[in-house]
Structures are given as structure tokens and as C-alpha cells.
Amino acid sequence: MVSRRSLLSLGAASAALVAGGDSVLRQARALPAFTGNKDYSRATGKERVAVPSTCWQCVTRCPNISYVKDGRLVRIEGQPASIRTHSVMCAKGQAGMS
């Protein structure tokens, strides 16, 4: 049988892990800015160029990063340095790639 004390400690440890995991993801998303605007494809390992851009899907004009490979747009993600969006893009912004 699980005691109340062990259940509470497990819950606290899980909450700390979830809260800390968010900061790790933000650091991982910010990595292309520190590598000289370079990003690498996970599938092929080849270099993709990161181009700072702006989303024009609505009037907000959120900043984003567009990844270009062989002259073609391959990925869009939110700008990690943005104070307004904190590297998050809405559904309209994600749909802007197509």
C-alpha cells in the first residue's frame, strides 16, 4: 500500500520534472540562434539556413524563424527571442508554410 507521504513526494518530484522540462525545451529551441543561424536536419544531418522572418497570416505580425534548405522553405517555428510570443506560433502561423 502506498503511504500518503510517498504519494505526495512522488507528486512533488513529478511537478518539478515537468516545470524543469519546459526550460530545457526552450533552450533547445533557442539553439539555432547560437549556432550562427544554422540548423541541421534530423533526418539527413544536412545544414538548413535559418532566416528571421515575420508571419503575415494576421495583423499581429509575430516574429518567426524560417528554415530554408536548397532554396526551399522546409520549416517555420516561433522566434525564441521574442518577448511577445516566447517561441510559440498559432495555428494560422503554422498553416502559413503551405
Image: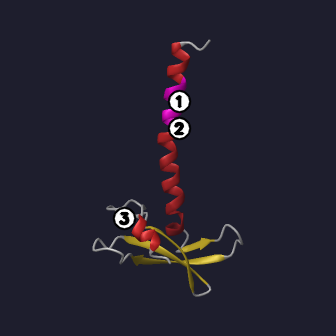
The disc labelled 1 sits on which kind of residue? Ala
Q: Which residue is mark 1?
A: 13
Q: Residues within 10 Å of mark 3 (few under 14, many from 20)?
A: few
Magenta stretch?
10-17
Circles 2 and 1 in contact, beta carbons < 8 Å:
yes
Q: Is residue 14 magenta?
A: yes
> At numbered mark 3, what does the secondary structure look like: helix, strand or loop?
loop
Quarter of the picture containing the N terminus is: top right
Location of residue 45 by image quarter: bottom right
- Dot 2 or dot 3: first in sequence order is 2
The disc labelled 3 sits on which kind of residue? Ser
Q: Residues within 10 Å of mark 2 (few under 14, many from 20)?
A: few
Q: Please give left or right for residue 23 compared with residue 41 in the image.
A: left
What x and y, as percent, mark residue 7?
53, 20
> At numbered mark 2, what does the secondary structure look like: helix, strand or loop?
helix
Q: Which residue is mark 3?
A: 82
Query: How many angstroms separate mark 2 from mark 1 (CA)?
Result: 6 Å
Circles 1 and 3 in contact, beta carbons < 8 Å:
no
Q: What's the magenta bit mostly, secondary-structure-wise?
A: helix
Q: Is residue 25 magenta?
A: no
What residue lies at 44% left-to-right and 75% top-to-bottom? 96
What x and y, as percent, mark residue 38?
57, 74
Q: Which residue is mark 2?
A: 17
Task: Say if 49 sits above or below 31 in the image.
Answer: below
What residue lies at 68% left-to-right and 76% top-to-bottom? 46
Task: Say if 24 sits above or below 75 in the image.
Answer: above
